[in-house]
Image (spheres, helix red, strand yellow):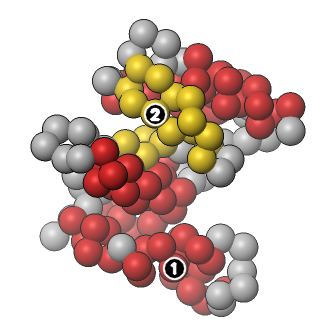
Amino acid sequence: MALLAGHLRTLSDGVTGAGRLCATLGDGLSGVVADADALRAAVAGANRWSTGRMHSGAGAAPLEGADLDAARRRAHLSLHVTKTLKGTTHGQCVLHVYGQPLGADAAEAAFAFLADLGAAGPGAPGAHYLAHALRWRDDWRLHLPP
């Protein structure tokens, strides 16, 4: 528990001056950050702090022209994008911003992850990532290369 608390504190402290991450959401944080680069740096810093023991990704969505509930849903989709790329070299495994398409290699890595989950079956660890991708497939399609 101390590892998780320290990791989340490092993440939250990393956006000081650019916004605020404070509301717990499961095992993560929620908040508003004005600069995607500041959020990316905060996640990278938290991941360095807990290297080999814990890894975070962040999902973000612009607030421009969208209500807060819509932005939260979009950020949640983008968080799941980071989780499909976890353990890869693709930058979106740290931060994905809703509306930014994946490159061909990143899309292929995400598909491979989801296909492996499909082959493992509904009781496999992480199966909810596949269920989420299927439920939000139209949003996923917006982020795939042609």
Question: Which mark is first along the chain, 1 or 2?
Answer: 2
Residue drawn at (72%, 73%) of the image: 125
User: Which residue has dot 2 on it?
Assistant: 31
Q: Which mark is residue 114?
A: none
Quarter holding the C terminus? Answer: bottom left
Amino acid type shown at disc 1: Ala
Of residues 10 and 102, the one nearer the viewer is: 10
Residue drawn at (43%, 55%) of the image: 76
Helix, strand or loop for disc 1: helix
Of residues 44 and 12, the one nearer the viewer is: 12
Helix, strand or loop for disc 2: strand
Amino acid type shown at disc 2: Gly
Mark 2 → mark 1, Cα distance in angstroms: 25 Å
Q: Is residue 52 left or right of residue 100?
A: right
Question: Looking at the image, which residue sits at the far right?
Answer: 1
> Residue 67 in the image: x percent, y percent?
24, 47
Q: Is residue 22 left or right of residue 32?
A: right
Q: Nearer the viewer, mark 2 or mark 1?
A: 2
Q: Residues within 10 Å of mark 2 (few under 14, many from 20)?
A: few
Can residue 100 be seen in the rendering of this structure? no
Can residue 8 be seen in the rendering of this structure? yes
Residue drawn at (65%, 22%) of the image: 10
Q: Is residue 21 left or right of residue 1?
A: left
User: Which residue has dot 1 on it?
Assistant: 131
> Residue 25 in the image: x percent, y percent?
60, 47
| 116 versus 14 height, above or below | below
Q: Residues within 10 Å of mark 1 (few under 14, many from 20)?
A: some
> Residue 130 in the image: x percent, y percent?
52, 77
Q: Residue 50 lies in what quarter of the image?
A: top right
